[in-house]
Amino acid sequence: HTLVFYGRGWNKIKSVLSPSEKEILKKSYKGWVHDKIDAISKTKFSFAFENIRFHDYVSEKIYDVMAANTVPVYSGAPNIQDYVPKECFIDYHSFKNNEEMYDVLSKMDDATYQSYINCINNFMQNPERHPNYYKNVANKILKHLELKK
């Protein structure tokens, strides 16, 4: 099981890392990617961590992971289930520590994993059931703007 991560600025933190953490960074950090969905789609699980943890603050992060047909490990809005069914993601805060999370993810059987994927596919193919799905919100804004013309 390989940990891979992407994004900008990670190599700027080298000065505060221990030698073993620097080695992990060297092995795992893949830099910035042009196509986020393509990069995520090559993984079974992907962290979808919001920058802040507030009620109703749900960004594109969890939706991007699901669009890549990958299971999100989510940390963010405490009420995420108002936006995404709980069967579509793994709650990062349900684990005591990272070791427990790794143990659960690495030992997950195919049937359990597939149940997440099936839920994700159903959710992503039927977003009209979820009024706060980002495409529905965007369409509401566009319709509102058209009415203002």
Image: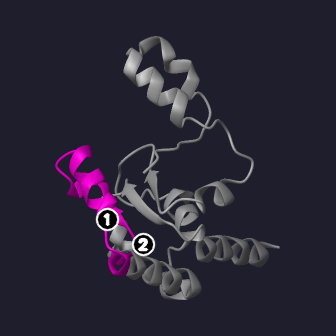
Taking the image as drawn, is residue 85 in sight? Answer: no
- Badge 2, how many Cα within 10 Å: few under 14, some, many 20+? some
* Amino acid tagged 1: Asn
Quarter placement of the C terminus:
bottom right
Identified by mark 2, the residue type is: Tyr
The location of residue 68, given as percent across then percent down, is 60, 67
Q: Which residue is mark 1?
A: 79
Quarter occupied by residue 69: bottom right
Give yes or no for contact between labels 1 and 2 (Cβ–Cβ under 8 Å): yes
Q: Which residues are magenta?
A: 87-112
Which residue corresponds to the image point at 36% horizontal and 73% vertical from the top-left? Answer: 82
Q: Quadrant of residue 11?
A: top right
Q: Is residue 109 visible?
A: yes
Write the residue at 50% across / 19% down: 13
- In this view, which residue lies farthest toward the right? 149
Front position in the image: 47 or 104: 104
Q: Which residue is mark 2?
A: 83
88 on left or right of 93 = right
